[in-house]
Every structure is written in C-alpha cells, then in structure tokens.
C-alpha cells in the first residue's frame, strides 16, 4: 500500500516539485535503468528500501515527461531518484481524510491501490500467450465485423505472431541495455538470427507506429486521459506510457522508462485498446465474442466435466448463462463479461458504483435466473441435473480487484446461489488443478465464510497444476518460443540475442 498509519504524508505538489527539480533528460534514463534492473517482481521486493516498484517508477516518469523542463534544472543522481521514490511511497491519500464512512473509505482506498499496483503483477508470459490463443486460435460464434482475415496486418502492420515477438524483443533489449532499445543493434553481429525471424524493417516500422511517443504527444495524451482535478487522485490516473511505452528524444535510440509496460502493449488488453482506437466498438464486440468462446475452450480442459453452451428457451428465445459446467460435485453457471475496470473504478470516484453495476450487474441476474430455470425443471434444461449444489462464476477479461469482498459485494444484485467473480487468468489456473476436483474445491471455498470473499486465486494456490495446453499452443506460435521452456519472454528472446 502507499501509506501506513503513523507516517507523515507527502503532499502531491511537493512530490511533483521534487521530480521537476531535475532535467527529464537526466532523470528519465535513471528511471529506465532502474526499471530494467528491477524488472521482475522478485527483484522489486529486494530493491533498496523496497522503493523501486514499477508503479512508482511509472509515475515519476509520467511527471517528468508531463511537467519537466530542461532549462535551469539540475542533473539527477541515484540518490535523487531514491528520494523521489521514497516520497511517492508516502504520498497523501484521500483515505487520510475520508472517514465519514470508514467501510466505504477503506473500499475506495483498496480500489485505488489495487488499480495502481496489481496491474504489474499479472504473469506476463501468460498474458502474451493468451493473445494468440484467443485472437488467432479461437473461433467465435458470430460473424466478425473486424476480426476477419487480414485484420492483423491492417491493424498491427504485421501478423499477430510477429507483433508479439516484436514486443518481446523490445522488452528483452530494454532490460539488457539499461532501459534502451537502439535500432542500430539490429545491424550488429549476431542480430542476423533475430532478423531472420522478423525482418528489421518490420521491427522498426511496428515499433514506430505502435510503441513510440515523444514529449509533445505524451503531454497531449496525459491531458486527455485526465478524469479528475483532485491532486490526491493524480497518481491513480491512466498513464499514457501504457499506450506508448517507448519515448524518443532522450539519448540514443528509444527509452523505455518502465520496461514492464512494453510487453503489456501486446497483451489482449493492449490489443483491445489498439483495435478500438482503429475500428471503434465493432472491434470490442468481435473481441467479446471470441472471449466467450475462449472461456469455453478453457472450461473444456476440466477433467470429467460436461460443458454445455448457452441454452435457448421460451417463445422469445431467451438465453441462459453462456456456459453450464456439470461436475460430479456441483453445477457451475458461467457468465462471461469482456469488461475491464474503468477509470472511475480505478480512482474510486462517486461514479464507481454505477459503473460496477453497469458492467457486472446483469451477469449476477443472469446466473440467478438460470439457476431458477434449472430448479423449476424447465424442459429446455432437462440435461442439467438438479441433485447437486449450484454456483455461479462471472469471468472477466481483466481482474476486478476486491469485487468479491464484503465491501463490494453488497453493491451488486443479491442472488440465491453463491456467485464469484474471477479473471480469465484465474480460470486458466483453475482448470489445470490436478490434485483435487474443481467442484470440491469450489464447495470448500464457499463453505468458508471468509475465504469465499477473497479472490478466487487464493483458493487455487498450494495445489498441483498441469500445464495449460491452450496457452501453450498460443505461446508456441511466437517466433522466440522455439526451444524455449515455459512462459518467460525475456529469457526466450535473450537466448536468441
């Protein structure tokens, strides 16, 4: 978390002034080098004072890019950067002042902290593997409007396989080169192996179009992304480095202020934003259809389970939940929502409740309605047993942190059956458990009043898992996967360098 009781909070204006004390051309390379040095979560936690967290580095980079000045400013040292990161860890927060409703204040604090920090804690390899597994290896049920043959080249400028491979390459080179990617490295001895897989011209063209920004463009994007003028919420705003993680104009080649954001550009979420910017809502609808089918593929990995698609019933041809999973222990009603937390949720604004209900409320109602139809013995649902417990599972494209917690659950519709919200990453983990039936695991979780309010991932830890063949197939489609073990992009590309 960003603040602990008893510590002296730092005003945001003082923190911003401290960052602006230094020339961006001096501070940003230090941030990039630190990010490359502490690229993995295990190394963040071992950094000096545990201050070199990627969200802190990302915010310092954003302030320097958006507010910095090259004139009459000082150079920067490692000590200066550490002081800036220390100030960031002590920034004042609305939680310090909002205690009219302690439970609500805590919920808002948790939403902001999760939105700021946990996006950096999703396994990168799995995110990248999912891109191909869902977008090129899954068949939707509806006719696509955008995701038709040729969409990859039209949107990305190359195949999805090469696009992800380029993101991996840029990331690996940034880590290897103190946060920089030098295009000249593609002409260095040994680069022939890389360019034999992806031509240098394609690497540079795709990088320039999708990954690179400059100071002027960054400042414009940062201003457009602003949702609130509340200085206490400034650091929780969307950081445009997530859209364009490489910056030109700060020394040789391209600078990656936060190297972890480079592969995120090629994740399903990164591609979603790229596609919506190009094609509009039609791309989001196509992706939603593929996501629903992809969830079905993952559910199909459950051993000794019957997976039924949505059921049409009644004269109006109404639809049940998207998937019904029948196991020996229970019936699991799965509703798929290709949604992601909006800025209002990340910032925990007054609009957050309405946004949460808009995105997830219908899913709770759909699960409860389907459960009632099954229990009533409706003929269309005759293939679903009524002799075992029923639970609901809402699968989202991105994590909705603390959504199952007591501070959030009352904001959503009440149901007659237990309902859990999980991300697709949690589902991908759940279907590979080998040491206990998933139905039993879910029943035991629900029976524990406390654990049932945690994220589903907590119940999955400590179990034996097989590899996920759907993700493995996605991963194997990338240029650097050949001969690589596991889902470690930087190691895989590094072997090719």
Image (cartoon, grey):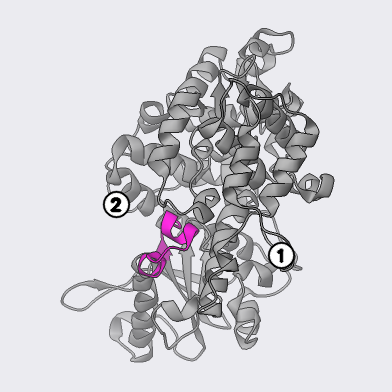
Is 151 placed above or below 435 here? above
Q: Is residue 241 visible?
A: yes
Q: Give the residues in magenta.
A: 336-356
Report which quarter residue 482 is drawn in: top right
Q: Position of residue 99 (x, y in %)?
A: 55, 76
Image side of residue 479 versus residue 393, left or right: right
Quadrant placement of the N terminus: bottom right
Instruction: Of the two numbered discs 1 and 2 on the same chain, state the one appearing first in sequence.
Output: 1
Q: Quadrant of the C terminus?
A: top right
Q: Position of residue 275 (x, y in %)?
A: 37, 38
Image depth: mark 1 or mark 2 in front: 1
**Residue 28 position by quadrant:** top right
Badges 1 and 2: C-beta atoms under 8 Å apart? no
Label placed on residue 4 = 1
Q: Residues within 10 Å of mark 2 (few under 14, many from 20)?
A: few
Distance from label 1 to label 2 (Cα)? 50 Å
> Furthest-front residue in view?
72
> Percent from the top left, x then y, of residue 322?
38, 67
Decide if residue 406 is on the left or right side of residue 35.
left
Question: In the displayed structure, would residue 308 be above or below residue 416?
Answer: above
Q: Identify the residue shown where x is 65% and y is 52%.
A: 121
Residue hosting label 2: 142
């Amino acid at each position: 978390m960003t603040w602990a009781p008893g510590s002296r909070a730092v005003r945001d204006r003082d923190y911003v002034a401290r960052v602006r004390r230094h020339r961006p051309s001096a501070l940003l390379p230090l941030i990039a080098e630190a990010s490359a040095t502490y690229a993995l979560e295990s190394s963040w936690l071992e950094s000096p004072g545990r201050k070199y967290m990627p969200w802190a580095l990302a915010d310092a980079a954003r302030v320097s890019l958006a507010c910095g000045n090259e004139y009459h400013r000082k150079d920067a040292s490692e000590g200066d950067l550490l002081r800036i990161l220390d100030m960031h860890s002590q920034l004042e927060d609305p939680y310090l002042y909002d205690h009219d409703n302690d439970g609500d204040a805590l919920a808002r604090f948790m939403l902001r902290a999760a939105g700021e920090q946990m996006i950096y804690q999703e396994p990168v390899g799995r995110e990248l593997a999912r891109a191909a597994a869902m977008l090129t290896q899954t068949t939707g049920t509806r006719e696509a409007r955008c995701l038709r043959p040729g969409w990859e080249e039209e949107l990305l400028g190359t195949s999805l396989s090469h696009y992800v491979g380029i993101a991996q390459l840029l990331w690996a080179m940034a880590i290897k080169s103190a946060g920089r990617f030098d295009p000249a490295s593609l002409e260095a001895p040994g680069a022939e192996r890389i360019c034999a897989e992806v031509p240098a011209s394609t690497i540079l063209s795709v990088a320039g179009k999708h990954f690179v920004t400059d100071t002027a463009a960054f400042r414009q994007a940062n201003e457009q992304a602003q949702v609130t003028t509340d200085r206490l919420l400034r650091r929780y705003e969307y950081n445009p480095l997530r859209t364009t993680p490489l910056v030109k104009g700060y020394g040789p080649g391209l600078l990656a202020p936060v190297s972890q954001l480079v592969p995120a550009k090629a994740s399903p979420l990164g591609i979603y934003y790229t596609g919506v910017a190009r094609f509009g809502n039609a791309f989001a609808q196509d992706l939603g259809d593929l996501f629903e089918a992809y969830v079905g593929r993952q559910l199909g990995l459950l051993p000794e389970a019957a997976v039924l698609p949505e059921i049409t019933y009644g004269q109006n041809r109404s639809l049940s939940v998207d998937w019904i999973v029948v196991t020996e222990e229970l019936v699991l009603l799965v509703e798929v929502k290709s949604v992601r937390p909006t800025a209002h949720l990340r910032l925990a604004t007054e609009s957050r409740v309405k946004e949460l209900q808009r995105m997830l409320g219908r899913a709770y109602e759909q699960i409860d309605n389907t459960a009632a139809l099954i229990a009533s013995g409706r003929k269309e649902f005759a293939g679903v047993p009524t002799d075992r417990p029923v639970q609901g599972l809402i699968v989202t494209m991105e994590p909705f942190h603390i959504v199952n917690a007591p501070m959030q659950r009352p904001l959503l519709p009440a149901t007659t059956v237990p309902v859990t919200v999980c991300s697709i990453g949690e589902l991908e983990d759940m279907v590979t458990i080998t040491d206990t039936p998933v139905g039993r695991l879910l029943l035991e979780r629900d029976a524990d009043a406390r654990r049932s309010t945690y994220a589903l991932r907590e119940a999955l830890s400590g179990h034996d898992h097989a590899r996920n063949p759907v993700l493995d197939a996605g991963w194997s489609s990338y240029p650097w996967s050949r001969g690589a073990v596991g889902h470690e992009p930087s190691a895989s590309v590094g072997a090719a360098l």
